[in-house]
Image (cartoon, rainbow, N blue to C red):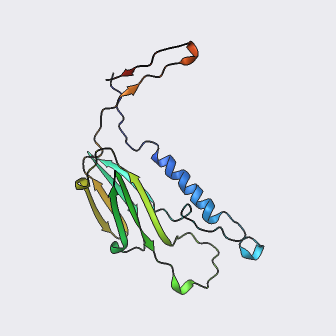
């Protein structure tokens, strides 16, 4: 019996949702502001802005869409190293509002970085990137094809000593 893994990004959405929640706590964790004796939380690499990203299978290709509103194409840096695609850059701050007292600040400024682990065997020649109106679209040709997986048998040791084997489909 063949056990195929059809989505190489299973669980990624939950992981990034949790990262977003932690980022929100780091950025907005202090409620009340300085006038109530509560200082704003310091932004660190753990609470920096992480762009919204969709990863979609289109036929045999993966389409990665990264939202970067307010950023010019020449300010986006894409790198691929050891199977990891990294999108990084910086959104400039609003210089005319430096002395303003924000009541709500939901538009993040400063550096950003988003790293995505691509399926094993992905080569740089498979990557094509385009930028339109603040949306970076990276196509990874052939990366969404199904691949064979090997199921590993799990022995129940509570039933006594057992031998472990690997089932190859």
**Picture quadrant of residue 106:** bottom right
Q: At 49% across and 19% down in the image, what residue appears?
A: 155
**Which residue is most to the right?**
37
Quadrant for the C terminus, please.
top left
Q: Residue 115 appears at what percent x and percent y? A: 42, 56
User: Left or right: 27 with respect to 169?
Assistant: right
Q: Residue 12 appears at what percent x and percent y? A: 45, 47
Vertical side of 105 occupied by 11: above or below: above
Q: At 40% across and 73% down in the image, what residue appears?
A: 71
Q: Residue 85 appears at what percent x and percent y? A: 36, 56
Quadrant for the N terminus, please.
top left
Q: At 57% across and 65% down in the image, what residue appears?
A: 44
User: Left or right: 65 with respect to 59?
Assistant: right
- Seen from the viewer's position, the closer of residues 55 and 154 is 154
**Which residue is most to the left?**
125
Vertical side of 58 occupied by 71: above or below: below
Q: At 65% across and 67% down in the image, what residue appears?
A: 41
Q: Residue 66 appears at what percent x and percent y? A: 39, 61
Q: How many marks?
A: 0
- Seen from the viewer's position, the closer of residues 64 and 166 is 166
């Amino acid at each position: 019996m063949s056990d195929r893994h059809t989505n190489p990004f299973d669980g990624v959405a939950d992981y990034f949702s949790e990262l977003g929640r932690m980022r929100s706590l780091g950025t907005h964790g202090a409620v009340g502001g300085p006038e109530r004796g509560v200082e704003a939380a310091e932004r660190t690499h753990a609470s920096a802005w992480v762009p919204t990203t969709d990863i979609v299978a289109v036929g045999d290709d993966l389409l990665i869409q990264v939202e970067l509103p307010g950023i010019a194409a020449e300010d986006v840096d894409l790198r691929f190293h050891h199977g990891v695609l990294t999108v990084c850059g910086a959104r400039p701050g609003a210089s005319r509002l430096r002395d303003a007292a924000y009541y709500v600040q939901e538009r993040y400024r400063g550096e950003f970085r988003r790293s995505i682990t691509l399926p094993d065997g992905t080569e740089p020649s498979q990557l094509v990137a385009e930028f339109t109106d603040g949306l970076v679209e990276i196509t990874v040709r052939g990366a969404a094809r199904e691949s064979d997986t090997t199921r590993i048998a799990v022995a129940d040791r509570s039933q006594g000593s057992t031998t472990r084997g690997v089932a190859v489909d």
